[in-house]
Image (cartoon, rainbow, N blue to C red):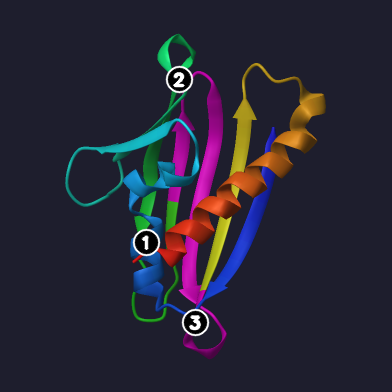
Amino acid sequence: MAVFSLERTVALPPDEAWRRLTRWERHGDTVPLTRVTAEPPGPTRPGTLVVARTGAGPLAFDDPMEVTLWRPPRGGTPGRCRLDKRGRVVRGWAEIEVGTGPGGRSRVVWREELDVGFLPPFLDGPLRRAGRHVFGRTVDHLLRQP
């Protein structure tokens, strides 16, 4: 199991940073061979199922994640979203927190616990580094895109 976090401070108001980070379909933009969908249609809420499908043909797998906490930022209170991974291959959770940082900027914290079922524990270190890299690129990309 790999646990990691990353933090970013960006020149966006918290509600805009939140909006950009929670456009689920855009999460696959930086991960090759990955497409992300969310069901049911409409605004995200607890119970929304976000599915990342990664791979091609018979080597593809789904990473279903259920939104179990949905609290957008409001009135100076940080926003927080938690996704619990429900898949057979990837388990764990992800949390996104967006609040006000220094100088009216947004402070973003992404925390994640990844457990890839078929990987032995001695690969947790490389998995943690890969997770920080992949999710760091994704967060940076999402925050740059209007």
Q: Would you say residue 11 sits in the magenta stretch?
A: no
Q: Quadrant of the C terminus?
A: bottom left
Q: Look at the numbered discs 1 and 3 and tell me whether their residues touch, using CB distance below 8 Å.
A: no
Can you identify the residue that label 3 sits on? 105
Measure how far apart labels 2 and 3 are at the Cα level.
37 Å
Q: Residue at x 70, y 20 (%)?
A: 119
Q: Amino acid at mark 2?
A: Phe
x%, y% of residue 80? 44, 60
Circle 2 residue: 61
Which of disc 2 and disc 1 is earlier in sequence? 1
- Bin the neighbour count of mark 2 within 10 Å (Cα to Cα): few under 14, some 14-19, many 20 and up: some
Q: Whole-percent x and y of residue 103?
A: 53, 90
The kind of secondary structure element at disc 1 is: helix
At numbered mark 3, what does the secondary structure look like: helix, strand or loop? loop
Residue 1 image offset from top left, x and y in percent: 69, 32
Which residue is painted at 79% across and 37% down in the image? 125
Q: Is residue 22 left or right of residue 141?
A: left
Q: Is residue 55 above or below residue 72?
A: above
Image mark for residue 20: 1
| Residue 16: quarter of image | bottom left
**Please, which residue is most extreme toward the right here?**
122
Look at the image and tell me whether residue 63 can be seen. yes
- 10 Å neighbourhood of mark 1: few (<14), some, or many (≥20)? some
Q: Nearer the viewer, residue 23 or 80?
A: 23
Q: Earlier in the sequence, mark 2 or mark 3?
A: 2
Amino acid beneath label 1: Arg
Measured along the vertical axis of the image, is residue 99 above or below residue 88? below
Tally of numbered discs: 3
Please provide the residue range marked out in magenta: 82-106
Q: Is residue 34 above or below residue 13?
A: above
Queried whether the magenta region covers residue 87, the answer comes back as yes
Residue drawn where x is 41% and y is 81% of the image: 76
